[in-house]
Image (cartoon, grey):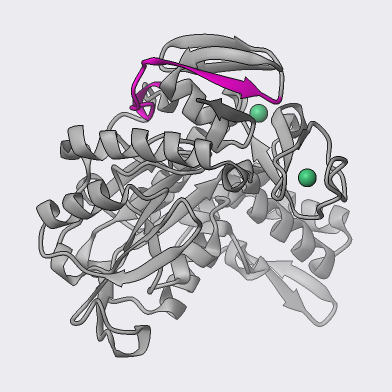
């Protein structure tokens, strides 16, 4: 992104981020068993530093103030030797984490608020191009400003995940923490000890369950026979979990043998119905990033740290319904600064609307930082 093309941008952001870590370090989430976690960060020069360990929050904050990184990460796993290489850390367990990201929701409005920024020279376009029109560079990054509809859909998807965690997996409210990722998503952290020692494979089974992968005709009573299929509903009924969801989608219950038979027949029989059922299950399932949940050695964005892709905070939501990420996560300073915007844009942040023109603009530092992190503006000294 253009961040790399301008040292003025980096030093402006670095100064703001440092100020935040220096003044507001209380809002930094302290992970449980901090001494067993691996920490890492990305510098503003795009250098990734990993395998760090801190004995307490004070040590961690001192490092953040000193380095003022672009992004800060902490392992979901805990280790006997967190600073060792991955092979010799001695894994002891990991929190269960889920990532809901806007890019996985395939929002139809996406093209209305996406920009394409040249990694090499920072030039910005409203439509996708194979090469930059200014420098002919071929590395182009997509930058998106989530709209109201996007933010609502992210919340709904998160709520649906919580229903699965609660209703199907029996995880108590107190063990589930919901965070706005700081950019365009939500991170859900589960600290229930029942799940801590699950290996990657078991987590992958959980992902399949939540996404609705691999659901069988038999689970709702459609069984294969020599001449086609027959219906025999499961003894345990269809009032729980996936059976309830699918039954309600098809409008059937335990007494709908002939109705379900007609549905399967109208689909073209057992095999074709299987495809229809898979598609329905996918649409009912939650769109989570499977890699995040199954990776038990991941270092993941740390709660209470600033997301370098947006300058917003990864912040906890205690009431998802009333939570507005664009207010709660906007924590940087509000002194006035100048930027040169590359685009025309309407922006809402921190209870303020900005109508930004493709020119020099005077903005509060938090709005300027957002535009710069998105690759849509350059800082003017
Ligand atoms: Zn370029
Ligand atoms: Zn949108």
Q: Does residue 29 appear to the left or right of 329 in the view shown? A: left
In-front residue for pair 351/374:
374
Residue 235 visible in the picture: no
In-front residue for pair 91/108:
91
Residue 223 visible in the picture: yes
Q: Does residue 381 appear to the left or right of 312 in the view shown? A: right
Q: Which residues are magenta?
A: 327-342
Q: Is residue 151 magenta?
A: no
User: Where's residue 305, x and y in %?
Assistant: 32, 44
At 30% from the left and 52% from the top, the residue drawn is: 67
At 83% from the left and 74% from the top, the residue drawn is: 228
Which image quarter has ligand 1?
top right
User: Where's residue 212, x and y in %?
Assistant: 59, 59
Write down the quadrant of residue 42 in the picture: bottom left
User: Where's residue 248, x and y in %?
Assistant: 59, 43
In-front residue for pair 206/238:
206
Q: Is residue 330 magenta?
A: yes
């Amino acid at each position: 992104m253009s961040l790399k093309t301008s040292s003025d941008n980096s030093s402006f952001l670095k100064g703001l981020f440092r100020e935040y870590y220096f003044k507001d370090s209380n809002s930094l989430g302290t992970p449980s068993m901090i001494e067993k976690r691996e920490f890492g960060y990305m510098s503003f020069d795009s250098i990734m530093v990993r395998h760090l360990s801190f004995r307490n929050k004070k040590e961690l904050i001192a490092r953040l103030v000193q380095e003022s990184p672009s992004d800060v990460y902490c392992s979901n796993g805990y280790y006997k030797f967190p600073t060792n290489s991955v092979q010799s850390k001695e894994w002891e367990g990991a929190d269960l984490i889920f990532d809901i990201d806007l890019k996985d929701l395939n929002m139809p409005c996406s093209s209305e608020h996406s920009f394409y920024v040249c990694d090499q020279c920072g030039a910005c376009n409203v439509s996708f191009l194979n090469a930059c029109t200014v420098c002919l560079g071929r590395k182009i990054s997509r930058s998106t400003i989530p709209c109201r509809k996007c933010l609502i859909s992210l919340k709904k998807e998160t709520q649906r995940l919580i229903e699965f965690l609660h209703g199907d997996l029996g995880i108590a409210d107190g063990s589930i923490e919901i965070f706005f990722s700081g950019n365009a998503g939500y991170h859900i952290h589960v600290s229930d000890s029942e799940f801590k020692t699950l290996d990657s494979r078991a987590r992958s089974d959980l992902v399949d369950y939540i996404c609705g992968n691999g659901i069988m005709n038999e689970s709702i009573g459609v069984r294969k026979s020599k001449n086609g299929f027959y219906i025999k509903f499961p003894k345990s009924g269809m009032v729980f979990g996936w059976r309830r969801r699918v039954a309600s989608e098809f409008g059937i219950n335990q007494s709908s043998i002939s109705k379900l038979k007609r549905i399967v027949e109208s689909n073209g029989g057992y095999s074709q119905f299987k495809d229809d059922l898979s598609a329905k299950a996918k649409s009912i399932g939650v769109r989570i990033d499977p890699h995040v949940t199954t990776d038990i050695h991941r270092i993941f964005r740390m709660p209470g740290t600033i997301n370098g892709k947006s300058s917003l905070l990864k912040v906890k939501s205690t009431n998802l319904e009333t939570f507005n990420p664009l207010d709660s996560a906007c924590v940087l300073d509000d002194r006035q600064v100048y930027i040169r915007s590359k685009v025309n844009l309407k922006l809402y942040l921190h209870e303020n609307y900005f109508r930004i023109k493709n020119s020099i603009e005077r903005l509060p530092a938090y709005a300027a930082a957002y535009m710069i992190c998105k690759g849509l503006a350059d800082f003017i000294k």
